[in-house]
Image (cartoon, helix red, strand yellow):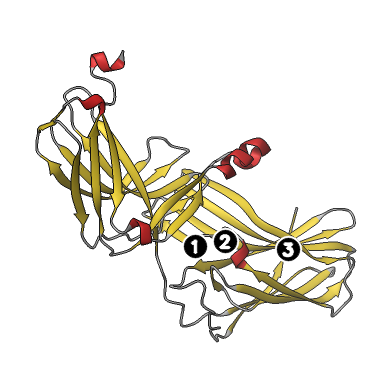
């Protein structure tokens, strides 16, 4: 019935990227803002994963567009074009849709297609300044969009691709060393070997108890991802715990040292994003939590930077750097 009024789909459109069979594929989960609030929804969200070909900044995006008219009928059109688009979509504000890259090429002038047609396209040396990201409340995506213009309703087909942005390891990577405590009750010193880590790095550190006058039951360490979208006063913060594990069980003794070794490669992490196109940021924190026998929780967060190196599989050479020390800080009580 829809086709009688010109509203049906009169053609199948397929986009094939050049060299796609040899190109690396990235698999990512679909964003789901409320998935962690409902176990069933979370399981469904985890089951829905996208597979996209991988591209890099400055790399050309080329391929073919295949258009097949349906039911052996001719396809009248007002022109066929393809666009390369980089966009940021905020889920908590449906109107907030920003295209920071938009390139267009004409594939065919107005006319008609009586049989299947193939059209080549190439966007040369495309700048892709940001890495792709699917978060809780924001999505940064790159895609090509084919539009077959028609008198009543256009035929539109999109195909996503994924972009990585590599970073050169920092010349200076200071360790994190800080003394925290509760006056006359608890005084500890914690140290992490670096403040910047690549995605397959290992966090190495230690915690030393200098003064213990409260009854500690156990201690936890977690990695927290905090996503910030929008700008004040319409700014939203959403945090999720990537991993949490117990590093101490039982009451510590004075001068006791607790070692820390955490391999990052086992978790679905992204690089740190800072004020991307003035739309969103994603930061990571190491969260140290002490729980006493009355189940009171004391925590201290420390931001770390995560970045992507050119080959995550290669052994990363440790970078020597001086320790950055801070004065006596205090735990935040929950």
Q: Are marks 3 and 1 in contact (CB under 8 Å)?
A: no
Residue found at x 53% / y 46%:
136
Give me the disc on residue 203.
Answer: none
Give me the disc on residue 331.
Answer: 3
Please identify the quadrant where the N terminus is shown.
Answer: top left
| Residue 231 visible in the snapshot | no
SS of the residue under disc 1: loop
Circle nearer the N terminus (1, 2)? 1
Relative to 215, say whether 162 is above or below.
Answer: above
Circle nearer the N terminus (3, 1)? 1
User: What residue is pinned by disc 1?
Assistant: 272
Residue 297 location, x and y as percent? 79, 56
Q: CA distance from mark 3 to mark 1?
A: 25 Å
Residue found at x 58% / y 56%:
225
Q: CA distance from mark 1 to mark 2?
A: 7 Å
Q: CA distance from mark 2 to mark 3?
A: 19 Å
| Residue 258 visible in the snapshot | yes
Residue found at x 28% / y 63%:
59
Q: Nearer the viewer, residue 252 or 139?
A: 139
Relative to 57, say whether 177 is above or below.
Answer: below
Choose top left, top right, bottom left or bottom right for residue 166: bottom left
SS of the residue under disc 2: strand
User: What residue is pinned by disc 2?
Assistant: 284
For disc 1, the neighbor class at 10 Å (few under 14, some 14 to 19, many from 20) is: some
Count of marks placed on residues: 3
């Amino acid at each position: 019935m829809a086709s009688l009024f010109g509203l049906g789909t009169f053609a199948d459109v397929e986009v094939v990227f050049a060299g796609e069979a040899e190109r690396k594929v990235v698999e990512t989960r679909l964003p789901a803002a409320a998935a962690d609030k409902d176990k069933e929804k979370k399981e469904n969200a985890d089951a829905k994963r996208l597979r996209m070909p991988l591209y890099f900044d400055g790399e050309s995006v080329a391929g073919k567009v295949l258009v097949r008219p349906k039911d052996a009928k001719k396809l009248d059109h007002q022109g066929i074009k393809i666009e390369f688009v980089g966009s940021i979509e905020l889920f908590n504000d449906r109107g907030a849709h920003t295209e920071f890259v938009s390139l267009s090429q004409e594939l065919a002038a107005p006319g008609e297609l009586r049989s299947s047609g193939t059209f080549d396209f190439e966007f040369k040396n495309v700048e892709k300044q940001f890495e792709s990201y699917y978060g809780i409340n924001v999505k940064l995506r790159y895609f090509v969009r084919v539009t077959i213009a028609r008198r009543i309703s256009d035929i539109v087909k999109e195909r996503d691709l994924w972009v990585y942005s590599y970073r050169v390891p920092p010349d200076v990577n200071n360790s994190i060393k800080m003394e925290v405590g509760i006056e006359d009750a608890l005084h500890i010193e914690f140290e992490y070997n670096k403040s910047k880590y690549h995605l397959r790095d290992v966090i190495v550190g230690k915690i030393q108890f200098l003064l213990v006058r409260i009854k500690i039951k156990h201690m936890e360490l977690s990695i927290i991802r905090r996503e910030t979208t929008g700008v004040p006063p319409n700014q939203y913060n959403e945090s999720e715990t990537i991993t949490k594990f117990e590093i101490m069980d039982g009451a510590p003794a004075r001068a006791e040292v607790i070692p820390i070794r955490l391999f990052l490669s086992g978790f679905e992490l992204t690089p740190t994003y800072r004020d991307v196109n003035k739309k969103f940021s994603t930061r990571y924190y190491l969260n140290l939590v002490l729980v006493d026998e009355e189940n009171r929780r004391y925590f201290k967060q420390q931001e770390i930077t995560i970045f992507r190196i050119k080959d995550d599989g290669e052994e990363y050479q440790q970078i020597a750097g001086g320790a950055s020390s801070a004065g006596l800080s205090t735990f935040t009580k929950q």
